[in-house]
Amino acid sequence: MSLAPETSTSWDAISEEAVGDLVARRVVEGRNFTLLRYVYRPGAVFPEHRHPQEQITLVLEGRLEFTVREATTVVGPGEFLRLGPDTPHGARVVGDAPVVSLNFFSPARSEHPHVQ
Amino acid sequence: MSLAPETSTSWDAISEEAVGDLVARRVVEGRNFTLLRYVYRPGAVFPEHRHPQEQITLVLEGRLEFTVREATTVVGPGEFLRLGPDTPHGARVVGDAPVVSLNFFSPARSEHPHVQ
């Protein structure tokens, strides 16, 4: 997408991409990072995967359970999870509330386009 | 700070740094980015400055007015502002409500330690 430079932008102004039936995301591409704002509906499961970027996921609403190297950790509002490059991880929604998260990847996803 | 790897971390677990009387922040250093969570009290003003990192500021609560190259833009909840490297910018709180924002810088601040 093309962003007006140096001007406030609303997430609502960015087109939503469906990722299966229960997950949607909006994407902002930086020069050196990719930011994704995810909304996960209850029941959503993100299968295990990995990517060469480091990642930080900040949960704004709801609760996400991550599985990282077979260990689980739940991330809720006001919490975040950091993952180094090439770390296998998956996630699922905990409970009946939707989850809203911000996911930063660096370097930018465009350099490694297979990031989920 | 040292973060337990691959485990959910609360912002409350990170020490707060004062930046003058009206601004406080918590810092997470990545390999390739720095994330700062700012809280600005009403009346806070961030003087114009610039840094070699690109920046994205996401406002979670309250309203921040940015001045970028003498133009102003207000960023509120659900909105964000992107700034390219070396872009002069300052900010001030609008109104009587505190502001909470997430500020990402890339590359990491440790490579250019004078970033404010």
Image (cartoon, coloured by chain):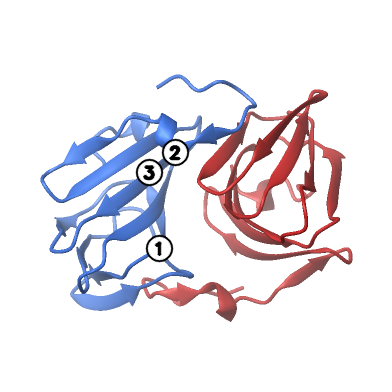
Chain colours: A blue, B red
- Quarter holding the C terminus of chain A is top left
Badge 1 element = strand
- Mark with earlier residue (2, 1): 2
- Name the residue that disc number 3 marks: A36
Labels 1 and 3 touching (C-beta < 8 A): no
Quarter holding residue B19: bottom right
Q: CA distance from mark 3 to mark 2?
A: 10 Å
**Would residue A54 be seen by someone viewing this image from the given angle?**
yes
Element type at mark 2: helix
Instruction: Quadrant for residue B35, please give it.
Output: bottom right
Q: Nearer the viewer, mark 3 or mark 2?
A: 2
Q: Secondary structure at mark 3?
A: strand
Position of residue A27 measured from the top left corner of the image (x, y, whole percent): 37, 36
Q: Residue placed at 37% from the left, 46% from the top?
A: A37
Vertical comparison of B14 with A58: above or below? below
Residue under the point 20% across and 70% down: A96
- Mark yes or no: residue A116 visible: no
Label 3 Cα crowd, 10 Å radius (few <14 / some 14-19 / many 20+): some
B91 horizontally vs A3: left or right: right
The amino acid type, in three-letter code, at marker 1 is Val
Amino acid type, label 3: Leu
